[in-house]
Image: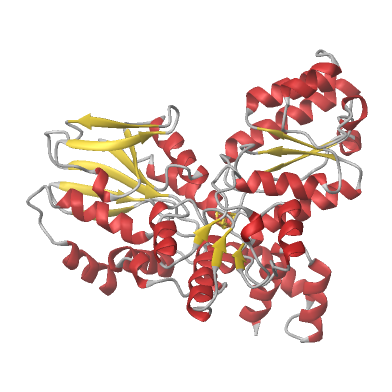
Amino acid sequence: MYDLGCVMYDVFMIRESFELATSIIRDMNLLSLIDLQKSYITHRKSYICDAMKTFNVPIIYRSPLVTAIKNNRKQQDKMKKDFTPTLLDFGTIQIYLARHFGFCYGVENAIEISFRTIEENPEKRIFLLSEMIHNPQVNAELQSRGVKFLQDTYGKELISFNELTADDIVIIPAFGTTLEIEKKLNEIGIRTEKYNTTCPFVEKVWNRSEQIAKKNYTVVVHGKPKHEETRATFSHAAHNTPTVVVNDMREAIELSKFITGENPSSAFYESFKNQYSEGFDVSKDLERIGVVNQTTMLASDTQAIADFLKQTMVQKYNLVEADIENHFADTRDTLCYATNDNQSAAMGLLETKADFAIVIGGYNSSNTSHLVELCEEKLPTYFINSEEKILSSNEILHFNFHTKQELLTTNYLPSQKPIKVLITSGASCPDALVEGVIRKLTGFFSIDKSVEEMIEEFRKL
Ligand code: SF4
């Protein structure tokens, strides 16, 4: 009973429906509200991830090694407080795996819905609005089963919406979509709600935007303007209130100059071209603001941007603490739990001295590129999307996300032993790819124990 109450509470909290959650739980007489709130605060982190639904994800994406490790760590650290990495000691090569990495709630949910939809509708045409998640292997698998993508990652039409009929199925990806696209599909007669895999943590940001919009704040979205999720969040926020997107601190500083009047209002429309809502009036729409973010941004960046804009308001309006909310909404950060966990785990991983790091994930994956950013501050880091990029013990092909190019690096393995490698992966990366990388690397050496023996060891722990 206790567990069920906490889980329900969390699921409803994600959807920002506190009253609904508490009334249902009260009716069910599961817990007193006070007990529930106490238990919620104490157990939130572990319940939110561990007690939520287990998804039916195709076995090809799972890894016996990673599953054994994750199960073991989960048992030992139910509250998810320990961010130290897991050591896989093969003797000549020592691999340190981040405490948290790989598929998140939203990705598993989207994969389950998509594969189930294919199975249940063999006679229908099935489309995905765009890439379901930013992972090339998963997207290719869906395409091989006949699913077609309507748009590319940036919203460019690949197949005209005019070709769709009411009989078709269109799956909305985990990033969500814009109200305009939803309307377009509904007008064709396509039921978007039935095959909607929008992650509840993305919806949580939309709800937060709606809440501050009701209090007449303008929404500032910290996100990548062209990213599917930011476009969707922008659309939902702009439906309720003036909205502007800032990509980074440089743009936040630029925005602050319009708040203080340092920049002429007329320049705003060029500086933030394609990043502000229709009818945005610089002279009044920057008087009350609140910051929300794309769920996968770097936590420290979002915090810095929110703090900076808050300070701008304090100085502009000479605010004392009690008056700040007159001009700056307290949104808290709207990163999702997976982004938080994976970034904290990457920081924990980086406390280990190592020769290099490997980060695995799709090259267009925002959360993965932020993990790369964290790692490359400390040590040589190779961003790869599969073990195939490790060409040999001498050559690795890896992605530079700053220049958007793949590079070939030679002699990436140092000669002294043991070699120490840090490994993590993004929230849309199947664990099977992580195991593939571990097998590939260990295959270059004479090792003390095999991967199979390592799996057995973790299963027995
Ligand atoms: S990264 Fe977070 S917001 Fe994005 S799909 Fe995963 S859980 Fe949802």
Judging depth in this view, the residue of 163 and 86 nearest the camera is 163
> What residue is shown at x 79% (from left), y 43% (from top)?
330
Which residue is the extreme one toward the left?
Answer: 446
- Image quadrant of residue 30? bottom right
In this picture, is 263 found above or below 209? Answer: above
**Looking at the rendering, in which quadrant would you find the N terminus?**
bottom right
Would residue 281 appear left or right of 143 to someone viewing this image? right
> What residue is shown at x 91% (from left), y 37% (from top)?
326
- Image quadrant of residue 287? top right
Residue 185, given in percent of the width and then of the height, sits at 71, 61
Residue 450, given in percent of the width and then of the height, sits at 14, 62
Locate ligand 1 by image quadrant. bottom right
Judging depth in this view, the residue of 322 and 388 nearest the camera is 388
In this picture, is 379 found above or below 135? Answer: above
Q: Is residue 128 visible?
A: yes
Q: Is residue 461 visible?
A: no
> What residue is shown at x 83% (from left), y 48% (from top)?
239
Residue 121, given in percent of the width and then of the height, sits at 53, 78
In this picture, is 157 found above or below 9? Answer: above
Number of numbered discs: 0
- Image quadrant of residue 298? top right
